[in-house]
Amino acid sequence: MAFRPQALQGSMHFSGSRRDQRGSAGSWLLLVIVVAALLWWFGVWDEFAGRSGVPAQPRAVDARGTLAEDEQNNISVFKSATVSTVHITTLETTRSLNSADVTQVPKGTGTGFIWDELGHVVTNYHVIQGANAAAVTLSDQSTWKAALVGAFPDRDLAVLRIDAPKAKLKPITVGSSRDLLVGQKVYAIGNPFGLDQTLTTGIISALNREIESITQRTIRGVIQTDAAINPGNSGGPLLDSAGRLIGVNTAIYSPSGASAGIGFAIPVDEVNRIVPRVIRDGKFIRPALGIHAAPPQLHDSLGLPNGVAIVGVVPRGPADAAGIKSFERNAAGDIVAGDLVVALAGKPVGGLDELLAALEQHLPGETVTLTVLRAGKKIEVPVRLGLAE
């Protein structure tokens, strides 16, 4: 007997006319529709369609517990200092080529902080350099026109002033930089890339660094930190873990212009010494000795030790009144040795830049001791400082 599959054996039961087949198919379709409607009515259809029918609910939130102590301190420092930190937008005047209209357009952005309740704002000089005007935005997002009070480019510092109500002005808490230690935690607040206030953290990586100011004068005692300092952070506060100002963020060391883990801040002791004098005088007035220093080439050609060789004394100036002698040429054209300044007020002076830095620690009218090398011997000469022109 030949093998015949059962499907083929029973196939004759489904044969018939086409009309019968259409009627049977219609009956089945009607039955499917009715069953589907009943399933939907009783809420069973979702299960057949691959849905549970359970309302969508978010997962239960697991309680976190209290924040870690260092996290709480981070938040506290930011909250206390952010109200004192401001966003600075500098403006420049432009004139349309097709009309006489003069408009002000944004030139750059930076950060600053409120110094006192009189509305003085401290920032970097390079933030406002070349601008015609500036606007200061406070933490409550109110914006105020700013006037330039004065600047000291040699230390990259500038002071602005806004006429905001006293209630809006929260001066920053000032600390000290003389007792800082490498490894201390620090916080930088600023407006990088024009963004709203941002907090970055790090440590003091090194102390007493030297960087060059925009006037090519050396800024000494600079704080180095690995807290991220990006464009727009300039002029913002560097804080210690107590939320006190310990420096003004001023520069980053990066070939790309973005933070690479090496940032620099002007120490607050310098800021606290310079800013009050800029506010009072509209500029930083350096005291004067009334001398002319030898250029480095002459100093080196004479084979002189470290110090400042004096090649001229201003008549009736402070040094002249104190009897300071300058290097001169005699009738034969030979150089006659004069005084070589090696210290001021007990602080060693290795060159002109160091002498100027030492002078900046004093005020016009003060009497300081000038240590000079004269005829191979060190002598101390009291000098009453004058006013630099």
Image (cartoon, rainbow, N blue to C red):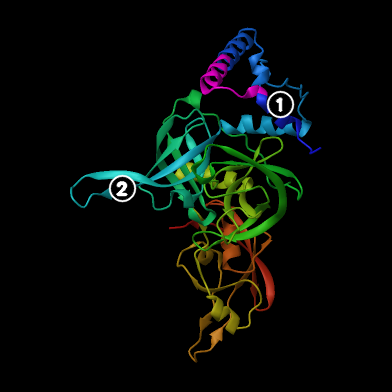
Q: Residue at x 76, y 35 (%)?
A: 4
- Quadrant (top left, top right, bottom left, bottom right) of the C terminus: bottom left
Say what secondary structure mark 2 lies in.
strand
Q: Nearer the viewer, residue 167 or 338?
A: 167
Seen in the image, is 118 located left or right of residue 62?
left
Q: CA distance from mark 2 to mark 1?
A: 96 Å
Asked where in the image residue 192 lies, by quadrant, the reply is top right
**Spot occupied by residue 327 in the image (x, y as percentages of width and height):** 54, 78
**Spot occupied by residue 135 in the image (x, y as percentages of width and height):** 41, 38
Asked where in the image residue 262 lies, by quadrant, the reply is bottom right
Residue 14 lies in the magenta stretch:
yes
Q: Nearer the viewer, residue 15 or 353?
A: 15
**Residue reaching furthest to the front:** 1
The amino acid on which the numbered mark 2 sits, given as a three-letter code, is Thr
Q: Residue at x 55, y 29 (%)?
A: 170
Q: Residue at x 81, y 37 (%)?
A: 1
Q: Nearer the viewer, residue 30 or 359?
A: 30
Does residue 57 appear in this view?
no
**Range of magenta residues:** 13-27
Q: Nearer the viewer, residue 88 or 274?
A: 88
Residue 93: assigned label:
2
The amino acid on which the numbered mark 1 sits, given as a three-letter code, is Gly
Q: Residues within 10 Å of mark 2 (few under 14, many from 20)?
A: few
Q: Are marks 2 and 1 in contact (CB under 8 Å)?
A: no
Residue 242: assigned label:
none
Say what secondary structure mark 1 lies in.
loop
Answer above or below: position of 348 versus 361: below
According to the picture, the residue beneath numbered tag 1 turns out to be 10
Residue 341 lies in the magenta stretch:
no
